[in-house]
Image (cartoon, rainbow, N blue to C red):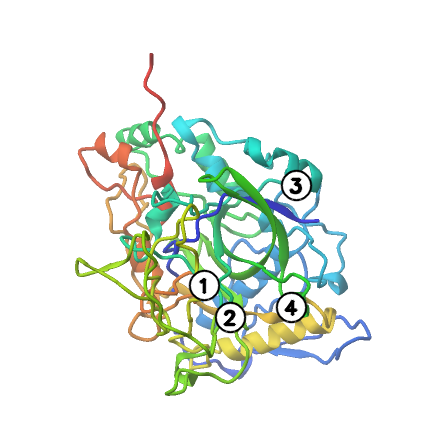
Amino acid sequence: MNHKLLTVIPVLLMLVTGCQEPVQKSSVATVASPATGTASSAPVSFPCLNAPAVNYNTPGDTPITSQDGVNCFAWQTFIGLSWPVDVSQPGQPDKSASASNFGEPGVQQTSVWETYANTKNIFRANAQPPLPWGQQPEVPSSCKKMAQQLGVRVMQASRMPGSFNMSKEASQAFPGNNPNWLADKNGNLVYYEILVGRDEYNYINSNGLYNANLQAEHIKQHQNIAMPMGYDNVQGGLEIKAAWLSVGDPENPKWKKYKTSTAIIYDPASLTCNASVIALVGMHIIHKTASQPQWIWATFEHKDNAPDTATVKTDGTVDGDYTFYNNTCSVNAVPAGCKPKTTNGIAVTQTSCEANVSPAYYLDTSGNCSAYPIRVSRDFAIKDSTDNHVASLNKAAQQMIANANADSVFTNYQLVNVLWSSAAVNDNVPPGNPPLTPLSTSGETPSLNTVPVANTMLETYAQGFNCLSCHAYASVARDAKLQLGGKPYATDYSFIFGFANKPAASK
């Protein structure tokens, strides 16, 4: 069983994500997927030479830097990270697992990426050292009995604490100065967690960068904050942002189309714990590689999340059944006692039935300020273009997985897009000269003018942006900045360094 402890904040963390020549006949790969007797085993054609496969491989870099090449790299990364983990080696795949069992519905197998280090286990209170790789954090005292009964594996994410105080993980949220939680059409909340791979964890730990004071010292010694690059079988810097939906009706057959887990959801306001099935609805994967020092930004989500905005009818209804779009909607007053959203300094007085409109008020579990359904639609459709065959790739990858296991939950996930650089610049070369923000966004592809790269579950209210332009401003923690004359020294496109604390004052 795959269990988590979520002290999760339902906020929209802004891990924003980012055309090459038209695909020629020579850049199409044909792969024969393994047959199981339950699905067609016909060859599958991919619009790239580095075609993905249903196996445990998570590549360190892409051999082909074109849009279709990085798209195929993203799919292979998604499959490799989703592979069942070796229970004796956190972060490593179970090489004995069969492709015919990949994504078996109803079986809560722990994936490789789920055993990566959560940022809360790295950037701890009073700058305590990170927990050892693979070690789970302590369970809140009020949750220990439940954790023992479930045999829970603790994977701590962030959660809205039931008051108006946000944790540090909200620093990446959009809108940052207004409520930004998300709930499905039944009012079930989405929870988020950020995790990092072993190489990045080791880099942060060995350099003391979990400590804001040591971040400042690192810069003063003319050392860049530059995470390792992936190549061959070396992973390099890798971060994941996952969006999980709390499932209110786990017996519903629809959830057999989702990767699921079991979470203990902890509410610090009431000090209560509740077990819940959660379903994966979205994921960002960002990866620093030798060919892409500006990182590769891939984003996936479940295909049943939301309709395309262009398909919404004039009466606000849509055809089809989507988890985050309800054809019936009513405008309601903001409940008394709830802290409302403000627009231009004016408090909002009612909810909205328009799609992609951020919540009208903050959540507060101690009052009547509970979640309500938010309508979501995709502003930019997933479709093929002359130099980006993402829709065709999705069909091919889904068919390839179905050829291995016709019932696999991963046939229901799709690549939204991949952001990369067609003219990458490494601002950390030469070393010894730590750069200030913003870092380079050279060659950002697709360009923002072409198509923004956004995930409806992670950038619901900010779908018109690309992430590289945002992450170029990622800098050291506030307490480090104060020791550096207020200068925003760059942290290699990663916002997680902003979570670092300084040690408690000496007595």
Going from N to C along the chain, the mark reached first, 1 or 4, is: 4
Quadrant of the frame with the C terminus: top left
Residue 241 visible in the shown view: no
Depicted 81 relative to depicted 40: above or below:
above
Going from N to C along the chain, the mark reached first, 2 or 1, is: 2
Q: Nearer the viewer, residue 139 or 107?
A: 139
Give the residue type at disc 3.
Val
Neighbor class of circle 1 (other Cα within 10 Å; few <14, some 14-19, many 20+) is many
Q: Which SS class for mark 1?
A: loop
Cα separation, mark 4 vs mark 2, equals 12 Å
Going from N to C along the chain, the mark reached first, 4 or 3, is: 3
Q: Which residue is mark 4?
A: 257
Q: Which SS class for mark 3?
A: loop
Going from N to C along the chain, the mark reached first, 3 or 2, is: 3
Q: Residue furthest bottom?
A: 314
Q: Which residue is mark 3?
A: 152
Depicted 188 relative to depicted 436: above or below:
below
Q: Are marks 3 and 1 in contact (CB under 8 Å)?
A: no
Cα separation, mark 1 vs mark 4, equals 17 Å
Quarter occupied by residue 249: bottom right
Instruction: Residue 12 in the image: state x and y as whole percent.
Output: 39, 56
Residue 94 visible in the shown view: yes
Instruction: Residue 361 in the image: state x and y as whole percent.
Output: 33, 57
Q: Which SS class for mark 2?
A: loop
Cα separation, mark 4 vs mark 3, equals 23 Å
Q: Which residue is mark 1?
A: 457
Instruction: Residue 36 in the image: state x and y as whole percent.
Output: 80, 71
Give the residue type at disc 2.
Asn
Q: Which residue is mark 2?
A: 305
Depicted 72 relative to depicted 84: above or below:
below
Give the residue type at disc 1.
Met
Going from N to C along the chain, the mark reached first, 4 or 2, is: 4
